[in-house]
Image (cartoon, helix red, strand yellow):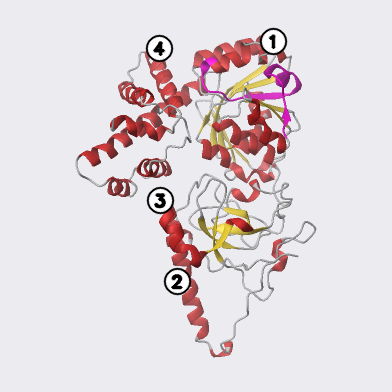
């Protein structure tokens, strides 16, 4: 049986997916959480976030030996906060050690940590390796006040019933999203839903914790279809599969389906076939034309709709397109729901999207487990078209805000001010947010890899302005921002991230 030179309590740098190397600590996992199949890994708690994860051995490095190297390659504010949290932790640990050394009954002896074995498939879970004489390793963890909590939401007080980290405020979504099967100690999903009725008639359904804890959910027994595997759709499908849903996928470029087939998805040959063989079919494509073509085109969804079949449009489109699609689907006896999502590729990957739904309320309820797998919160907004309106307003604000941030950065540079100092000041004030920090860092580093396509935010601005025209409502800020994005598109920035709007100001 293989062994590694890491022990419970050791500080490490862990690399998870697209995230940069992040400081963490090897800890014992909850008793109900089994090691992922086929992976030689350790269970790591990350500093400065609310995350835990199983991390492969090859993605771990000792903290102290690689500290300078890691600090050089990552300058983000949240990364620095994580490093600061590690230093706070070390100071506290050193203080406790000094206090223990001063006690005569200790006789200067310490119980050595035992090497942590890599568990094979049939072994007991990792917590069985913990030395019974050791205190709970989380006792000396940093207090919540020393770490900025990311993504804390209405349900951030979730507690494990039998876990060495049950009271740890940093216990969050990577944990169960990487588990093989639901934890047996979790409550039934019906007890974990919080339903809020408002005078407007809108309803919010959200998990008792950010929904990517969703290893606890009971997936629907309905067959799920998914059309469109772009930036958003890929993360959504991945999370549906992780949570045990039976999913059939289709994409215009069929090669994009391969990865999901390997993860257990089924392949649909046409949208019509997916709609006819699945109980609930989701679609997530780029714009109103693509959404219409998917339903009304050759071998389109409409040809596969039968009475009782459900179709859910997740694309961000205009209310008129939603009305048209709703009418044609229901005319065939189908059930229709719109459910555009607020978020980015990273939030999609993490199962932390915000879902805005409208249309058939019973479809919304039937999709409860799906929405919990893909998002942290979902809202039901009434009749079809309302979600499209709300989504366009949200993206109008986000797009205008991003253009203003880019304008501020370039004006700082033009007037001889430090852009980094501008960002540091901004992130200490009332406008501080993960969005501002990440997008500004992208700009300063010249990294415009798409998390949300610039061409899509420009499309949403255009649709929002049109919606304002129809309501005879002025949208001068959105109109000005739209012109800046059009300029960025003319500079070949369409397929870059929305933060690439910065380049419209420097050319």
- The span from disc 4 to disc 2 (Cα, nearest Å) is 61 Å
Which disc is residue 470 wearing?
A: 4
Q: Earlier in the sequence, mark 4 or mark 2?
A: 2
Quarter of the image for the N terminus: give it: bottom right
> Where is residue 499, by image quadrant?
top left
The residue identified by callout 3 is 76
Quarter of the image for the C terminus: give it: top left
- The span from disc 3 to disc 1 (Cα, nearest Å) is 52 Å
In what element is the residue under mark 4?
helix
Contact, mark 4 vs mark 1 (Cβ under 8 Å): no
- Outermost right residue: 122
Q: Earlier in the sequence, mark 4 or mark 1?
A: 1
> Where is residue 266, by image quadrant?
top right
Residue 72 left/right relative to 36: left
Contact, mark 2 vs mark 3 (Cβ under 8 Å): no
The residue identified by callout 1 is 332
Q: Earlier in the sequence, mark 4 or mark 3?
A: 3
Q: Viewer-nearest of labels 2 and 3?
A: 3
- Range covered by the magenta-colored residues: 265-289
In what element is the residue under mark 1?
loop
The residue identified by callout 2 is 91
- The span from disc 2 to disc 1 (Cα, nearest Å) is 67 Å
Q: How many numbered callouts?
A: 4
Please give the name of the residue rendered at 55% of the width and 23% of the height, measured from the top-left corner: 315
């Amino acid at each position: 049986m293989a062994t590694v030179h890491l022990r419970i309590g050791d500080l490490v740098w862990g690399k998870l997916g697209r995230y940069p190397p992040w400081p963490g600590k090897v800890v014992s996992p909850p008793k109900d959480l089994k090691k992922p199949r086929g992976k030689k890994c350790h269970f790591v708690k990350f500093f400065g976030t609310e995350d835990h994860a199983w991390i492969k051995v090859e993605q771990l490095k000792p903290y102290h030996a690689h500290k300078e190297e890691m600090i050089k390659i990552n300058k983000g504010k949240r990364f620095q906060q994580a490093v600061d949290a590690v230093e706070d932790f070390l100071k506290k640990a050193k203080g406790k050690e000094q206090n223990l050394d001063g006690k005569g009954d200790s006789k200067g002896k310490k119980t050595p940590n035992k090497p942590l074995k890599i568990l094979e498939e049939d072994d007991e879970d990792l917590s069985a390796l913990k030395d019974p004489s050791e205190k709970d390793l989380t006792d000396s963890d940093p207090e919540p006040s020393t770490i900025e909590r990311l993504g804390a939401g209405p349900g951030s007080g979730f507690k494990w019933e039998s876990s060495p980290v049950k009271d740890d405020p940093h216990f969050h979504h990577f944990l169960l999203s990487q588990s093989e099967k639901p934890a047996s100690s979790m409550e039934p999903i019906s007890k974990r839903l919080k339903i809020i009725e408002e005078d407007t008639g809108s309803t919010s359904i959200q998990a008792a914790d950010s929904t990517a804890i969703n290893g606890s959910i009971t997936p629907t027994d309905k067959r799920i279809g998914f059309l469109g595997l772009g930036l958003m759709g890929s993360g959504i499908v991945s999370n549906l599969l992780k949570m045990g849903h039976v999913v059939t996928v289709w994409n215009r470029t069929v090669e994009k389906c391969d990865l999901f087939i390997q993860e257990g998805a089924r392949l649909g040959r046409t949208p019509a076939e997916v709609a006819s063989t699945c109980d609930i079919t989701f679609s997530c494509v780029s714009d109103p034309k693509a959404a219409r073509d998917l339903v009304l085109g050759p071998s389109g969804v409409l040809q596969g709709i039968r009475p009782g079949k459900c179709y859910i449009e997740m694309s961000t489109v205009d209310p008129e397109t939603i009305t048209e699609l709703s009418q044609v689907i229901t005319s065939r006896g189908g059930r229709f729901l719109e459910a555009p999502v607020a978020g980015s590729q990273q939030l999609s990957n993490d199962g932390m999207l915000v879902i805005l739904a409208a249309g058939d309320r019973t479809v919304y309820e039937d999709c409860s487990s799906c929405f919990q797998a893909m998002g942290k919160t979902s809202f039901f907004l009434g009749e079809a078209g309302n979600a499209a309106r709300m989504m366009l307003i949200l993206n109008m604000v986000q797009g205008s805000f991003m253009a203003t941030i880019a304008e501020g950065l370039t004006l700082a540079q033009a007037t001889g001010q430090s852009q980094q100092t501008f960002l540091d000041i901004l992130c200490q004030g009332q406008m501080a947010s993960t969005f501002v920090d990440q997008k500004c860092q992208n700009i300063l580093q010249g990294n415009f890899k798409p998390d949300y396509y610039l061409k899509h935010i420009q499309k949403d601005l255009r649709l929002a302005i049109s919606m304002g025209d129809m309501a005879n409502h002025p949208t001068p800020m959105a109109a000005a921002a739209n012109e800046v994005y059009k300029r960025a598109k003319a500079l070949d920035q369409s397929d870059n991230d929305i933060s690439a709007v910065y380049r419209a100001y420097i050319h």
